[in-house]
Image (spheres, rainbow, N blue to C red):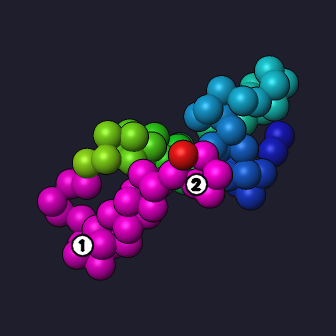
Amino acid sequence: MIDCREAVRRMWHYLEHELETRRAEEFEAHLETCQRCCGELEFSRHLRTMVAEKEIPPEVPTELRTRVEALLGASDRPTEGTE
């Protein structure tokens, strides 16, 4: 069984469906017994959706909103040599 540290390392790959079957099964087995990592997974899913839709809920603190908007704005700019 994997520990929380390894589960967190695999989380984004899991959400992107990039884990090989055995590693995904190990991750899912960990989630069956770890409430903390289940919460992390839900947060990550919500964050992915929010970023994909570029919608920041109004209850997000101003400082965090500013940082997220800056990151989202940076992702809209073409990277060097890709125009």
Q: Position of residue 47 (x, y in %)?
A: 41, 49
**Residue at 38 percent of width and 60 percent of height:** 73
For the residue pair 37 and 20, the one nearer the viewer reads as 20
Q: Earlier in the sequence, mark 2 or mark 1?
A: 1
Mark 1 crowdedness (10 Å alpha carbons): few <14, some 14-19, many ≥20: few
For the residue pair 14 and 5, the one nearer the viewer reads as 14
Q: Quadrant of the N terminus?
A: top right
Q: CA distance from mark 2 to mark 1?
A: 29 Å
Answer above or below: position of 3 versus 64. Answer: above
Badge 2 marks a residue whose secondary structure is loop
Q: In front: mark 2 or mark 1? A: 2
Q: Position of residue 6 (x, y in %)?
A: 77, 51
Task: Residue under label 1, please give it.
Answer: 61
**Residue at 68 percent of width and 38 percent of height:** 13
Q: Position of residue 59 (x, y in %)?
A: 17, 63
Residue 82 horizontal side relative to residue 52, left or right: right
Please name the amino acid that badge 1 sits on. Pro
Task: Residue under label 2, please give it.
Answer: 79
- Residue farthest along the top direction in this orientation: 21
Marker count (numbered): 2
| 63 in magenta | yes
| 40 in magenta | no
Answer above or below: position of 79 versus 38. Answer: below
Residue 58 horizontal side relative to residue 52, left or right: left
Badge 1 marks a residue whose secondary structure is loop
Q: Position of residue 12 (x, y in %)?
A: 63, 43
Which of the numbered marks, if any, corresponds to residue 42?
none
For the residue pair 36 and 67, the one nearer the viewer reads as 67
**Residue at 58 percent of width and 54 percent of height:** 79
**Residue at 25 percent of width and 48 percent of height:** 55
Give the extent of the magenta segment.
Answer: 56-82
